[in-house]
Amino acid sequence: MDFLAQYYDWIRAFHIIAVMFWVAGLLLLPRFYAYHSGAIAGGELEAKMLVAEERLMKIIMNPAMIAAFILGIVLIAYRHADLFSSAWLWIKLICVFGLMGFHGILSADRKKFARGERPRSEKTYRMLNEIPSFAVIIIVIMAIVEPF
């Protein structure tokens, strides 16, 4: 635990950076899907969106989510065992796992787009684009204020 104590601030900093990259992708990908949904099948815009969606997911979102999750586990492990009795942490974790599920839905939709399908409407993706915003508000308040 001396290692964790010595590098706690660095671990926390990299956790926050990873979360920022991940959430940026969660906010951007549904917007890409909205544009993709309106694109002409087989057209130039669709081809560009397929490349952009895959790169965003594989190069930024997946590694950032994994890093944020692993570093988050390390941060939780460093804190006291009674941390799990704190309601704020459970609320935060529910939101985090919700975002991971949302990430999974977006990943499945990317594969459907790659097969030439249109899984949801442009309007639906514009509405889905708001989910990460609400989750992040709750997560930040729980992590910083620890109200419960």
Image: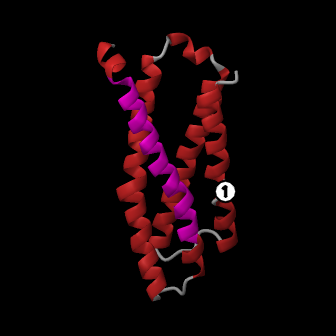
**Residue on which disc 1 sits:** 130
Q: At which x and y percent is residue 123? A: 69, 71
User: What residue type is disc 1 on?
Assistant: Glu
Depth check, front residue: 52 or 133? 133
Rate crowding at label 1 as few (under 14), some (14 to 19) or many (20 or more) other CA atoms within 10 Å. few
Name the residue rendered at 47%, 43% in the picture.
19
Give the main secondary structure, helix, strand or loop, of the magenta stretch. Answer: helix
Q: Could you tell whether 126 is left or right of 29 in the image?
A: right
Q: Residue furthest left?
A: 3
Instruction: Give the SS element for disc 1.
Output: loop
Q: Count of labels shown?
A: 1
Question: Is 132 situated above or below 31?
Answer: above
Which residues lie in the magenta part? 7-33
Q: At which x and y percent is residue 81? A: 50, 11
Tell me which corner region of the image, top left, top right, bottom left or bottom right, holds residue 125: bottom right
Depth check, front residue: 87 or 9? 9
Name the residue rendered at 46%, 65% in the picture.
111
Q: At which x and y percent is residue 59? A: 35, 57
Tell me which corner region of the image, top left, top right, bottom left or bottom right, holds residue 93: top right
Q: Could you tell whether 94 is left or right of 14 in the image?
A: right
Q: What quarter of the picture does the C terminus occupy?
A: top right
Give yes or no for residue 14 being in the magenta stretch.
yes
Question: Is 7 situated above or below 31?
Answer: above
Name the residue rendered at 65%, 59% in the picture.
128
Name the residue rendered at 64%, 51% in the picture.
133
Q: What quarter of the picture does the N terminus occupy?
A: top left
